[in-house]
Structure formats: C-alpha cells, structure tokens
Image: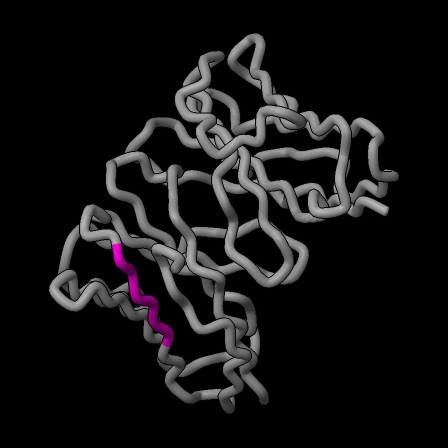
Amino acid sequence: QKEVEQDPGPLSVPEGAIVSLNCTYSNSAFQYFMWYRQYSRKGPELLMYTYSSGNKEDGRFTAQVDKSSKYISLFIRDSQPSDSATYLCAMSPTDSWGKLQFGAGTQVVVTP
Amino acid sequence: EAEVAQSPRYKITEKSQAVAFWCDPISGHATLYWYRQILGQGPELLVQFQDESVVDDSQLPKDRFSAERLKGVDSTLKIQPAELGDSAMYLCASAGALNTEAFFGQGTRLTVV
C-alpha cells in the first residue's frame, strides 16, 4: 500500500464550479503538506503548503489538513479552463520541503 | 525569471545503452533533487544533494543509476544500461534551503525502446 493515496480522476467540472480534491495518507510522521499543479509536459509548480493541521486560503484556493483523519483537501472556487491540469498532493515528515512523498495526481478538466 | 534548466527535453534510447541528463539549478540554490515520474504516477525522489554532497540516495537504483554534482552547481544523472522500465519523466528541482520551496524544471522525457 502506498503512503499517499490520491484518486487519479479525471475529474470534469463546468467553468465556475468548485473543484474538490483530496488525498489520504498512512504515515503519521508527515508534518508538511503541499499541493502542486502540473500542466501537460511541464514540471510541477507549488500551489499551497500547510504545516500540521488547519486551513489555509490563497485567492480561489483553500487547503485543509486533518491530521487526526490523515486526510488533506484542496478546493478551487470559481474554476476556470486555465485550471485544467493535474493536481498532486505531496507530504514531508521533515522541514525539507523538496524531499516529498507525492500522490499519483488527479487530472482536472474545466469545461467552458 | 530564474528557473531550473534541464536538457535534453526529450530522449529516445535503445535498451542497454547509456543515457545522461543534465540539470542547472537556480543560481545560489544549494539543495538539488532528482525525481522520476512514471506516466500516470506522482514523482518519486531518486537523490538529494546539499551542495556537492549526496544527502539521500536511498531510492536510487545504484546498480545502473549514478548522480553527481561535482562543483555543487549543475548536476548529471546517468543510467547505464537503460532498461525498458526506465521510460519516464526525469525531473530536477532546486531549493535555496531545506525549508523553502523546491522549484522544478520542465523535465527530460526518456523513452527506452
């Protein structure tokens, strides 16, 4: 069983809808939680990070971490066609933000 | 805008041949990572450098893979001999410090035939 589980999708939503993404994990040592966005044939880019449990908001994006349930979420409000990409959750047990355990990624398609 | 440079972007090689990938991190970034991303999966860490030293290579298949960062700046990842299962995207990332964002390059897509 993988340490980080993520539904690969694809997840198709109409423009303007809320996109809801999530990951579960098994390693209770994870302390840093991140969401990356990856466009086709490009490298991942960091969207948001959260330390330990709680919520964090940045514009149209909200990240939530529930360590008691080992469950993290990313919500995208007012989705746009430009949000179409693969979204990867990633986690680290240390403060080495580049030493990450990634989920498989969820492909999101926002249709106009 | 500073970015991580990788070359080549695409590489096709025959199995049993040697292949090498190059990464030039963002200037001043001491920490460098190599990841492998198989199609449909998330990236998996292969090796981590701090300056010219290997910090973690526990997931690097050392019988065929090698990585170096001789002067603590650019880095090379080599595979010899390549196998069909090595077909993947090889991503390089760099960070200014351990607890700061790691920036990824665009990757080298390897196809082994």
- Taking B23 as reference, is B109 left or right? right
Prevailing SS of the magenta stretch: strand
| Residue B98 within the segment the image draws in magenta | no
Q: Position of residue A34 (x, y in %)?
A: 33, 54
| Residue at horizontal 29 percent and vertical 60 percent from the top | A25
Q: Position of residue B60 (x, y in %)?
A: 53, 31
| Residue at horizontal 81 percent and vertical 44 percent from the top | B112
Q: Nearer the viewer, residue A36 or A102?
A: A102
Q: Position of residue B83 (x, y in %)?
A: 75, 40
In the image, which residues are magenta?
A21-26
Whether B59 is drawn above or below A27: the answer is above
Q: Position of residue B67 (x, y in %)?
A: 59, 21
Res B58 visible: yes
- Taking B47 as reference, is B98 left or right? left
Residue A59: name its quadrant: bottom left
Q: Nearer the viewer, residue B96 or B38?
A: B38
Q: How is the image coloured?
A: one colour
Quadrant containing the C terminus of chain A is: bottom right
| Residue A25 within the segment the image draws in magenta | yes
Residue B7: name its quadrant: top right
